[in-house]
Image (cartoon, rainbow, N blue to C red):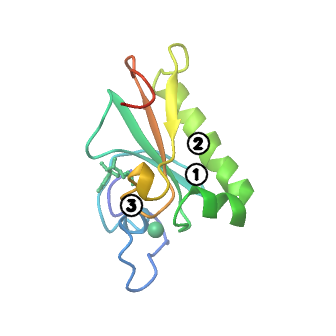
Amino acid sequence: MPDGDRGTYHAPMGTDCLFCRIVAGEIPATIVRETATTLAFRDIDPKAPVHVLVIPKEHYADVATLAEADPGLAGEVLATAAVVAEEEGLTGDGFRLMFNTGPHAGQEVFHAHAHLLGGAPLGPMLCR
Ligand code: AMP
Ligand code: ZN
């Protein structure tokens, strides 16, 4: 899908949320899948051969807020991630799905997003 051709969604006036602006087509992204309620696009600074971010189009600050407000939408984010994992050829060897939430997790963008990582052995879950 061409950048800037993202239908009728518009980021709320004055929003400074990066991912809302990607949903609105105001900032370009390499989109790999879109549903009515979710968007999947490649991370700009990939940490694995496959690194895709999966977000709800609606703004929630993090996955906990999303899950509490709209568990169905949280499930749709997971379902989109599973389809992208299949499309990216990750199902056989596996993948990691990660939601950084809050300062201890180093969350930088406060619009809920799943990191879908794979394409090579990912190493231990945490560096110690
Ligand atoms: P987090 O630290 O969990 O909040 O992750 C934010 C992620 O967003 C990081 O992996 C960044 O590389 C990624 N990111 C930042 N800006 C962009 C962008 N314009 N397009 C795609 N990914 C981005
Ligand atoms: Zn947002």
| Chain-order first, disc 3 or disc 2 | 2
The secondary element bearing badge 2 is classed as helix
Query: Which is in the foreground here, disc 3 or disc 2?
Result: 3
Position of 99 with respect to 119 (left or right) is right
Q: Mark 3 vs ligand 1: CB under 8 Å? A: yes
91, above or below 59, in the image: above
Q: Please give the name of the residue rendered at 30% of the width and 34% of the height, measured from the top-left corner.
A: 47
Label 1 environment density (alpha carbons within 10 Å; few <14, some 14–19, many ≥20): few
Residue annotated with mark 1: 35
Query: Up-down: is 53 above or below 69?
Result: above
- Give coordinates of residue 109: x percent, y percent: 39, 60
SS under mark 1: loop
Q: Which mark is residue 80?
A: 2
* Nearer-the-camera pick, 103 or 122: 103
Q: Can you name the residue that lies furthest to the bottom here?
A: 13
Q: Which of the two residues, 110 or 105, is positioned nearer the viewer here?
A: 105
Residue drawn where x is 36% and y is 58% of the image: 108
> Which three-letter amino acid code belongs to the residue tagged 2?
Thr
Q: Real-space Cα distance between discs 3 and 2? A: 20 Å
Mark seen at residue 109 = 3
Q: Nearer the viewer, mark 2 or mark 1?
A: 2
Say which label, 1 or 3, has the lower sequence index.
1
Q: Amino acid at mark 1?
A: Thr
Circle 2 crowding by C-alpha within 10 Å: few under 14, some 14–19, many from 20: many
